[in-house]
Image: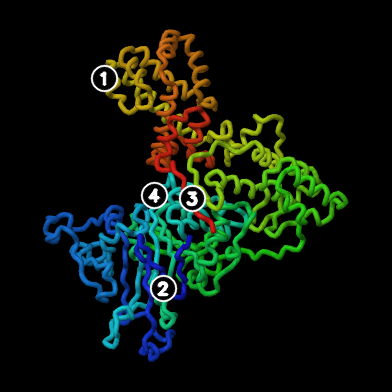
Amino acid sequence: MKTNKRRLEDDCTVSPSASKVRRTTRASDANETLAQLPQPSSHPVSAERFKFKVRIHSRQKAEALDPKLFTALAEENPLDHVSPTGSAEFKDSQDNGFDDDYPTVADDPQYQPMPGNDAVEPLDVGYLRDDLAEYDEFTGMPWLEAIDVVATRARSVIDAEPSTSRVGFCGAKLIRRSKFRSSFHYQMCKPFDESTLMAFDLFDQHGRLKETYKLHECLKGSGVWQEQLDEHEILLIEDVTVDKQYRRRGLGTAMVRTLFEVARRKTKGANFVAVVWPHSSKDPHFQDLLKTILWTSGGLFRAKVLDQCDPAATPWARSLGFRRIGSSMWFGLPCIAGNITAVLPIEDDRDPQVLDRVENILPTLVTSARSDKQFLAAVRKHYRHVEANDLQWLATDHEKNTLLHLASLQFFPKSLAWIMKQSCSDPLLKMRNSSWFEPLEALLQKLEIMRTRAVVGDSVVFKANAFRGHTLNQARCIALLKNVEIDSEEDLEQFRYGCTCNKCSYGYISPRMRFSLFIAASMESSRLEDLLELSGSDFLMECDWGLFHLPKYSRKYLERYEVMRKGLVAVYRRFEECLIDREEPTKRTIKVYMEFDAEEQPHLVYTFFRNKANIAGVASTVLELASWSDEIRGDGSIQELREDVGTEHDPTCRNDHEFVLVARKCGYAGIVKWLSIGTLANISLPLA
């Protein structure tokens, strides 16, 4: 699939499609008068010589998502400011005929000075015509807005055609990630362009900067990027092009600054983070990057562009204040409360280390093995006469993968166990491949990618919420690399669900998840207990949505019998006790706790189970309530409760927000469709 990438320096053309609105326009050939212009370096940008037009591709998205202006106009009669047609008035662009698809808005207070808003500097802003906007390629993505800045020369009387005045273009996307954090990777698959690469390379499944770029010894780079990239909207600058005759006059910088000014006014509190990949030739590398970032992992394949630094584009990006994000190819610049400031001095910004040439190469007999048995036989055969201290044990493939890397990345536990018994295992455990991962890090990185997407033929298929645990062989490989002794398959459970805090109950219920579920069960049981004094019909009316997941026959008995209503409250209490005791809140466990309760209230428990009141319905309600208060999937109110009770310092974990995994593991599959709304389908990204 062609990606329509554009160069950072040279102007280019994107072929229009019948179903997509063209985002760029071909710059015309310079006419004869351009040869008479002075040298570029002698003329800085001047408002009299150049104009900047901002083109926004969706007025509907802007009206729905942009922050509202609170000005003196709000106190006046709004009808005084409505045009006769009921919509905004438009004026012709100063280049009439050049931008007819983006008529300039004449009365938008967000971009033009108006009473009560005099501090706003005027911007020439045009929205794509409504009849064309519905065919824009990003129409179905309400969280993404395409924004362009076009630089033109002031009209000269000797210009024969209006199109000759265009001299520069800057294309960007404003990504409002706060609107879709719970399905960040799934949604970011849809554009299938540079924004897709950025999402999967920099951010985790919830739109936060990956831990590897924050903490990893090699990949964190300067280490300055931490929480700055976790919040606020993302302004991805994809293209900056200037005609050759007008370069080195500051036009590119002026267009980016104009773009920043627009982003300030379109984001809440003027908070956003600008991100750019400064490279002048992106097309040839797109497929390689797609394979590296979305497909393979752990270092089995590495795109050459990751080790390159554009000698012109990179210094230019740094001159604007952009700084490298970790050791990635991306550069960032935060804007907080309208203030754009580089995160560190330019002289302290690090570039990735250059990889040394691989000279000690593993034989093809070893690297070509495709089964555990074949790999182990090849390694034994090759090393049977090699001394224990021989450097051949430290040989690698072309991606610097050692014997341990290859065995772990291909999930060969028998081979891995044999290598770990050799005297060379200690240095092998600390060696890094071309992606700067040690064997254990590479394995965990690959498993994380496999958890969210899979390779089917020549496509990467994103499967949301389908994870049911790593295989036993994969878990054995993790245990071997961690030097943990395994006596039975039950001992492997702690390694099967991606726990990163080492404190997950049964390997998947993290401390933060347990607290969220406990609070949801506790608050609901207290609420229902307060309603026990009501009549049956009033009880059902007050509960309403709280009984949604219970079967209809249970509701009938709840209305008729008080003992059933007390039994319902008892189930919530037993759910709480399971979590307090760090037990799995499964049907079986809750029934065991209910049997203990039967000694004191036998009639209550007997009646509850005789009428088949649904434990799964109670558990489903708890899971849904917990997800509603979650920081990622809900309104974030659980964080305030953590601070109130002093648990905000509990270790974070990969499984903190995995409600679907908990539901499946505990046997409540019926709630999954309610916990994964909007991420049920698969998305295929074709790989050439």
Dot 1 or dot 3, earlier in sequence: 1
| 3 and 2 marks in contact (CB < 8 Å) | no
Q: What residue would you read off at disc 3?
A: 684
Answer above or below: position of 34 versus 403: below
Dot 3 crowding, Cα within 10 Å, few <14, some 14–19, many 20+? some
Disc 1 secondary structure class: helix
Q: Examine the image and state in which quarter residue 133 appears.
A: bottom left
* Cα gap from disc 2 to disc 1, whole angstroms: 66 Å
Residue 665 in view of the camera: yes
Q: Amino acid at mark 4?
A: Ser
| 3 and 4 marks in contact (CB < 8 Å) | no
* Between marks 3 and 2 in the image, the one whose residue lies nearer the viewer: 3
Disc 3 secondary structure class: strand
42 to the left or right of 85: right
392 to the left or right of 497: right
* Between marks 3 and 4 in the image, the one whose residue lies nearer the viewer: 3
Q: Examine the image and state in which quarter residue 248 appears.
A: bottom left
Q: Amino acid at mark 2?
A: Thr
Residue 178 tag number: 4
Q: Amino acid at mark 1?
A: Asp
Residue 253 tag number: 2
Q: Amino acid at mark 3?
A: Ser
Residue drawn at the location 35% of the way across and 89% of the way down: 33
* Cα gap from disc 3 to disc 4, whole angstroms: 24 Å
Query: Which is more toward the observer, 348 or 414?
Result: 414
Residue 214 in view of the camera: no
